[in-house]
Every structure is written in C-alpha cells, then in structure tokens.
Amino acid sequence: MLSVFYLSSIITIQDKVGYYLELSENPEFFIKRRDELKQIFAGFNHSFPSIEAKQVYADFLEKAKYYSEAIEQIQGLIKLEERNHFYWHQLLSLYNYMDQVDSIIEYSNDAILLFPDNPVFYLFNGIGNIQLKNFESAETALYKGLKLINDESKRLKFDFHVYLGDVYFHLDQYDKSDYHFDEALGMDPDNLLVLNNYSYYLSLRETKLAKAKEMSHKTILADSLNSTYLDTYAWVLFKLKDFNLAKLYIEKAFINGGSKNPEILDHYGDILLNLNDIKEAVKFWKEAYYIDSSHNEIYLKIMEYK
C-alpha cells in the first residue's frame, strides 16, 4: 500500500521521491485517487519534514488540482529557498492558470528583482499587465524579456512575439504589431490562435484584407467548427464587402456555439444590415445587448434602426 510505503521510516526519502516521479508519469492517477493520495502525501510531508517531501506534496497538489493549497506550499518553499527559480515559475504558472492577475504582477516583479536575467518572469509580468490593459507596462516588460532570450529558446521567443503583437495593436503601433505577429508566424506558420488574432486585428484596421482572409481561411480549414475562427472569417469577408458569403460563415459561427456570444451576435446584425434585412439585424443586436449591456455602440444601433 502507498500509505505504508510513504510513512515507512525504513525506506529512504530518495526512494520515495523516485517512486513519486514514476507515479507522476500518469497524471490521471492523481485525479482518480486525489482524496486518498492527498492524505498520503500530506502525511509524508508532515512525518518526514524536508525540502524533498515539501516538493512532492506541492507537486501533487498542483497535479491533483488543489491549486490554492499548492500555492501555499510553494510559497513555503520559496521562504526556504528563495533563489530557486523553479518555485517562482511554478507559483506564477498557478496564478496565471487561476487568473489571479494582481498576484501575477506582484510575484513576477519580485522574481525579476531576484532573477533579472531570466526572461520567463518578464513574460509573466507582460501577461499580467495585458490582462489589466496596462499596455505600456506590458511593452516594457516584454521588450526587456525578449532581449534576454538566446537563439535556442524558440518557443519562448515565439510567445514574446505573440504578446508583443497584441500589445502594439492596442497601443496603435501597427507596424510593430505586424512585425511581431509575422515573426511569430515565421516560427510557427500554422498556429491557429495567432492566425486568427492577427487576421482579426487586420480586419478591425481594414488593412491587408487579402492577407487577413488567407490567414483566417487556414484556421477554418483546420477547425471548421470553431465559432471564434468562423466569426473572424465572416468579419474579414464583411470588411471585403462580400456580405452574402459573410452571412454564410456567421451563420456557421452562430450554430457552432456562438449563439450566446455578444460579439458574434453583433457581427451577425451588422452583416444582415448590409443585406438590407434590418428587422433581423435589430433582433441580433438586441440579443447581443441583452447578454452584455456594456456595449453602448450596440444600443445606439438598436435605437437608430428599430
């Protein structure tokens, strides 16, 4: 039994850690027996106080999705070994997963002070500031971090370019935005998320629409039932004034999970308006406004065309 194994005073901690690493190769094991295993690893941590036992318990809590408790354990490890960058990375990953933006920014700032040459912590800081719409602060962090990356860290460099593309779009620095998205696609030309976001941003700017159409079309070929990708393709077609084809794809977006998405409903209304179906356009705008009344421009359209 695992409980006997982990509470044994005869078996070494190193052997217990080694066996844990074997168990962790099957993540589903932690989920299926999470309550039982929590008792076992908590007992191990309590009965054999050591860095290794704390690491095992923290890692288990994360894998078993006890995220808040995992954060507490990792914070305890940081107090014991402040200069272990792995703990900081693990902590920030959890805060990012749990969407605790203020904590992302707070702890990434602390990590940057401790590890000023580690680009990962600048990435977390940039992500946190993007979520708070602090785009100038995000730009500062991401630009510094990008300069620290060596040529071998291609995936990390890709992430920086993607986020910088987003940041510069929101700062209305479109040439820089395009540059970073192009750099990201140069590394991963079939990345659907980047293809979608880049093409959507181009459609909002009403520029390079042929390129936007080509990129967006790749996303719906790869994932033909994704309402977000279908909506983007419809919106690019709308900007190209191909209203009939835009209607076909916005209908697909609506059918495939977009019926409760206010942005898709708003786009549906705009497309119908340009096909002179004003009554249906107003209906979709009303549905969009009912779901999210913060969009004043939708309200104004309803008032104008009702």
Image: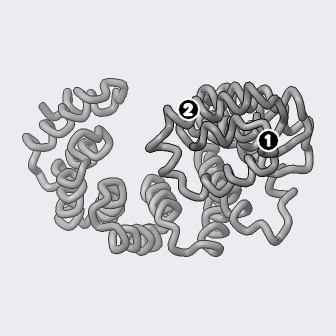
Foreground residue, 305 or 151? 151
Whichever of labels 2 and 1 marks the residue nearer the N terminus, that label is 1
Q: Residues within 10 Å of mark 2 (few under 14, many from 20)?
A: some
- From this view, report whether residue 214 is shown above or below residue 20: below
Residue 87: image location, x then y, percent: 78, 40
Q: Quadrant of the C terminus?
A: top left
Q: Is residue 99 visible?
A: no
**Where 226 sits versus 9, above or below?**
below
Location of residue 102 with respect to 266 vertically, above or below: above
Residue visible at 51% across and 73% down?
Answer: 190
Query: Are there few (<14), some (14-19), or many (20+) residues within 10 Å of tag 1?
Result: few
Q: Secondary structure at mark 2?
A: loop
Name the quadrant containing residue 285. top left
Residue at mark 2: 66
Distance of label 2 from label 1 (alpha carbons) = 29 Å
Give percent across and percent down for residue 274: 19, 53
Q: Residue furthest front?
A: 10
> Which circle, 2 or 1, is nearer the viewer?
1
Find residue 283 and report its image quarter: top left
Q: Tell me which residue sits at (66%, 33%) in the image.
A: 134
Q: Residue at x 74, y 54 (%)?
A: 18
Query: Mark 1 highlights which residue?
Result: 10
Q: Look at the numbered disc 1 and give the secondary structure of its residue.
A: loop
Q: Quadrant of residue 300?
A: top left
